Structure formats: structure tokens, C-alpha cells
Amino acid sequence: MEYFGVALKMAIITKSWRQFLISMALIGVLTFPLEQAAADLERIEVLDRKLVGNGKSFGKVGPYEQLRGRLYFAVEPNAQKNQNIVDITLVARDARGHVHFAADFLLLRPIDPTRGNNRMLYEPANLGEASILTLFNDAAKTNSLSKSIEYGNGFLMEQGYTLLWTGWSWDLTHSDERLRADLPIATTDGKTIYGRVTNEIIVRKKVKSARQFPRLSVGYAPLRTNDLDARLLVRDSAFGENRIISRDQWRFGHMVNGRLIYDPAFITLDTGFDPGSIYTVTYFARSPHVSGLGLAGIRDALLFFRSRRTDDHNTPNPILVSGGTFPRAIIAVGNGQSAHALQTMIHYGLTSDERGRLAFDGALLNSIGSGRGNINTRFSQPARAPSGDLDIDSPSFLFPFAATTQTDPVTGENGSSFDNMGKPLPKLFYVNTTTDYWTRGASLIHTDVDGSKDLKTQPSTRLFMIPGGRLEYTHDERQQDLSNCSTTLNNRPILRALLIQLDAWVTLDSEPAPSVIPSHATTTLGNLQVYLKKFPNVPRTRTPAQFFKPRRLNFGKRFTMQGVADVKPPQLGRAYTSLVPIPDVDGTDTGGIPLPGIAVPLGTYTGWNLANASTGAPDRLDGSGGSFIPFPRNEDERLTDKDPRISIKERYPSRKIYRESYATAAHALAEKGFLLNMDINPMIDRAERLYDQIMTHNPANETCF
């Protein structure tokens, strides 16, 4: 109001009401003309509103409500902020020259917004799902967004966050259960665009028909059902040579009761797909969706929710209803695929508008490896982003990104992930597990492309590594088709603590913990030979013969500048030198944030887990988690088995001593800001249960814990 009075007095003195309106726009009192001029979100539509958890009260914040609806965008393709969106100028425009598209959204907010923390937590819907509730709230994994949301332990609600998800991927199946985006198609002067599409197929058992699209994806169909130019290649391993399978040996579709039914999602091979092989299918498709607009929709949706009172049709911003205010800060969170969406936005400078306003102030990118998604390219299929071990050998990631500028001695390319970003930069946490070092080249975030030296990171960036953690949120007690038991460690407590640290950095400028990663400087990072030399000779344990080293990919001359791949599959060039964390005397990876289960171990935790012989690919690494190999229970078992690792009883003479040691480690980690007090006692209880399971488990029994 003080600024209003000053502006009004100046208008009276100068008799210039035009100057008054300009002053009001500049100070944000009369924001609507300026908002409409800069806005790209044209309309918001709320389709459904309900209570979360039947009106459950979350601590001092109280009940939450769930809103689901649609966002409608009208963007200016020639605007500077949109110039890095591939094919945006090839989309049909309205009379004003705008490009239109739409996306789903889901919003959870306190019914009484004055009791919230005035911060928004945003996630690009992960394959259409609201997965951060599983990540931070321990909620059951579900995609039933049309029903009451799964809120788990209520952690994010009790903190008072407003939670937002939007769809951004065009190639998810149409369903009320998932958030997706409807993105326009590119044409050349109204004529259809054609191009090659490449997909990879890996199966777990011998089958005659296999999916080339994931179950959630629609993908691009081939131009013709009997396309003679389509190719199916096979190789024995990620590093093997491709062999061509004769075109008369396979076809599009799947077998039903001995009859071939055409379905572009499937490939049928006369000799059947072998579980030990990797298949690549390439064919011509038509009408590419402009996938980069999905990322622009993320940016413009966040700018709307944080700064506009109404849409262009005077529909109020739901954040402001019932006494709400604009969020003080927006923090984005990505996990796996959604992390790659955020990293792709960062790479292409799609995180701010032309006025320099950030869409999000900070971001936590979990389990990202060193890749960014192949999203903003022609004929990209975001829902095909690698997931676990199924696509880990696919060139679907564009490697590498580094947190500082460097020059590639092979290609001569120079730059970093932040070259297209303006100022200020959002504050960023990159979090990886040791599995991401083995299967996603995570070391390339913080080393040069030759792996020979550590790189400095941006002041606005922190890097963290969690040894023995797992991409999946829940521990699978079945060994299934893996050689070792899956890790028993749960990295979600550390992620909760990191979120609180990032929040304080963004909102209070409170300096977070320094980066905690393996490095050359601490001798905790090395190649496979160094790793195997350090790893103990654990009985009945096979060690990896290789790990993921991303290759330089040649998609053709138009790819770098135009995002158009003329060479598919790409030509494979020299590999980048990725590295892995070096193990300690027990075989557990070093150099990261040690969970109490690492500091006070009951076994060896690795970042890798090999497939077993039944898969046909016993040297293939599981992409979603590492191994847990329990110590011998006592000295007799250790000596009988010739196990070089000290037994549990020799480490902890009693259950009580183990509990006390674990509790001490948990409290020490909390003092460093990597655990919240709320998580300590539940973690101690889980650790005691694991101790009991191991000590009563017959070593001859091959079941897991």
C-alpha cells in the first residue's frame, strides 16, 4: 500500500495516469495486464475436487483437499524462451500465432492454506504417477489418481507443502489413472513429416511375441504393417556386435491362439526372443509430436501457480482460494524418469521465462545417473525412458552432463549442463545410489569425460551418493532372477532429510551440507580393475565382468542443432570413462553418505547385482538396486566357509550391543543433517528385525531376508 500511495501522488502531480498504470504494473499491484502479456497458460479447468483421506487431519496443518483438472496452454513459438524447443515452429498456429496444447494436473493443498508452510513441492508426473508420495511419505505405490490419493505416513502434508503434479509426456496410454499431455504434431508446410523410430527389446524368458513399447506407452506405429524397410537387430550383450535378423522371420503383432493379430506394440519373431539377447527394431513412422512442449508446459504451469491470480478467462488460481497466497518458493523433485525431465529442462534453458522468473527455485533430482532424457528431439518417446534393467543398454539417454564446463577431447565439444540457463540458477541437489554408478554412469557428473580428474561443481549445486540404496522404494524379499539378495537398505530417510536441507537453502539461504561423493581426491573412485582388487573373496559370490560405460552416439549432422536424428540406431563411438565407488574391506562401497546399516553392517552392500543363469544373461547388471550378502553369523561359520569377512558375533557380541551401535550411528548421521529425528527409532526397530532374521536364518536356505 505504501508503493500504491507513492504512485498515486506522482500521478496527481504529473497528471499522468499512464505513468500510474505503468508504476502499478512494475510493482505488481496491477499485475493482470502484464501477466496476460507474458502468460502462456491460457486456461485452468478443475474437473474434480475431494478430501484427502476422507478428511484426515495432518498434524497442525489439518485436512487436505485434492484437485484434478486440465491446463490449457497457448505459447508463442517465436519467443526467445521457446527457441530451444525442437520443431516448435512446425506446429499449426491460431490467428494470434500461438501454439496450443493441454496437460493434466493434480493438486493437493491444505484446506486452510494459512496453516501450510507456503511452499509448493512439484513433480513432473513419473510415467503419469504421483511417485513422490511413495518417495517421501512411504505411501503404497499406486496410479489410482482418480480415487483418493495414497498419502502414506503423511510426512509432506504434516510439513505443510502444497503438492503439484502435471502431465508432460504425450505417449502414455489414455487413462483417468495417469497424468499425461496432449501435444501437437509437427508438419512441414502442412505436409506430413516422416522419420525413423528405434526401440529396444529385452525379455526375461523365452517368448515368441515381445513388447517394443512398455505397457503404459502407445509409441509410434510403423507406416505399414509389412514395412520391408524395417529392421530387427540382435546382439548378445550391451557391448556386442549387432546382427540383422531376416525380415521374413519377424512381423509386427502378437500371437493369439496361434493366429497373428496386428498390434504395433508387439513384435513376433518366428524363432522366439531369447532372454540373453538385446533386440533393436527400427522402422519409419509419421507425424512426430513436439515433445519439448511438454517441458514448456511444466515451466508455464509453475509460473502460473506462483504468480498469476487468474487465468485468461478469470478462473482463479486454486492456490489463492480460501485465503491462500502465492508460494514463497517452489521446489521440484524428480526420481528416475521425472528427474531426467527436469534435467532436460535445465539443459535447454526451459526453467525461466523472458523476464528471468524461475519456474522452480530448487530441485532434488534422485537416481539420475549422468544422463538427461532423450525428450526434446523429433520422434522422441519419453515413456520409453530406461527403467531398471529392461532398457539399461539403450541409447535413450544423451550422455553425459557435467556440473561444470569441460571439453571433450574426442569430439571437441565444450560446455556444461548449465550453458543455456540464465541467472539466477536454481539450487540443485543431485542424488545417486551406488547402483547409479554401476548402471547409469553417475561418476560423469563430477569427473571429466576421461574419468581422469575430479571436476568442481557450481556453487548452486550439491552432489550426494547413498551407498547400497535402491531405486525401487520397497524391498523385495524374493531373489527372483538375481544372483544375490536385494539390498535391505531404505534410502528414503536420507531423501527426506535432504529435502529439508534443500528447503532451508532455498527459503532461508541456509547453507546445506557440502557434496558427499566418491572421488579421486579421497581415493574412493576407480575403475573395475581397482574395484575387483579391493573386493573380498566372498564365498559363492560372482563379481561383475563389466559395468555401464555410455558411448558417444552419432545420430547424424542435424541432431545437435535441430534435434533430428537421421541415423537410427545411432553409430556407436568411443565410450566415456565412467567409474565406480571403491569398496572397503567388507566389500561395501565407500565415498557417500553411510546409512546406519552401512556404518554398523550386518553384511556386504554392493551397488551391483548380477542376473542368474536362468535369465540367459548372467553377466547383466540389475538396473534398480544392488546386493546384500550377509556376514557369517559366528566365527565357526566364518572359518568353515573360509569367509574373509568378520562375523556378526565377532563384531557385536550381543543383540543389545548391535542395537546400541546402530543407534549411535543413526544419531551421528542426524547431527550432520542427513537423518530426521522422526526416522531414527523406526530405523532402529527395522535393523533389529533384520538382525533377528539373519541370526535365525539357516545359511543352507537360499531364501532372502
Image: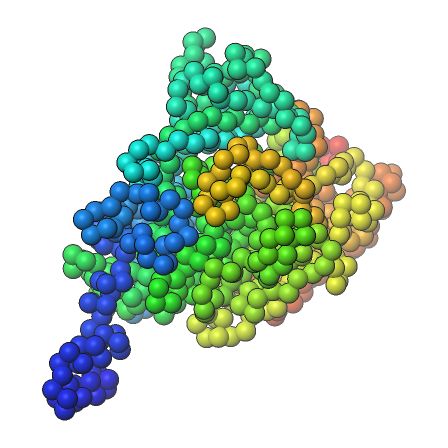
Q: Is residue 426 above or below residue 606?
A: below
Residue 318: quarter of image: bottom left
Closer to the camera in the image, 639 or 296: 296
**Going 81% across and 52% down the picture, which residue do you hit?**
585
Closer to the camera in the image, 132 or 246: 246
**Going 39% across and 64% down the picture, which residue do you hit?**
358
Closer to the camera in the image, 542 or 660: 542
Labels in figure, total: 0
Q: Is residue 141 above or below residue 459?
A: above
Q: Where is residue 587 in the image (x, y as percent from the top left)?
A: 76, 48
Q: Is residue 590 left or right of residue 300?
A: right
Q: Position of residue 165 (x, y in %)?
A: 36, 51
Q: Quadrant of the C terminus?
A: top right
Q: In this view, does 445 lie to the left or right of 352?
A: right
Residue farthest to the top, as pictured: 258
Q: Quadrant of the N terminus?
A: bottom left
Q: Is residue 168 in sight in this rendering?
A: no
Q: Position of residue 570 (x, y in %)?
A: 56, 35
Q: Is residue 413 in sight in this rendering?
A: yes
Closer to the camera in the image, 87 or 359: 87
Q: Is residue 110 above or below residue 527?
A: below
**Going 68% across and 52% down the picture, which residue do you hit?**
409
The colour style of the image is: rainbow
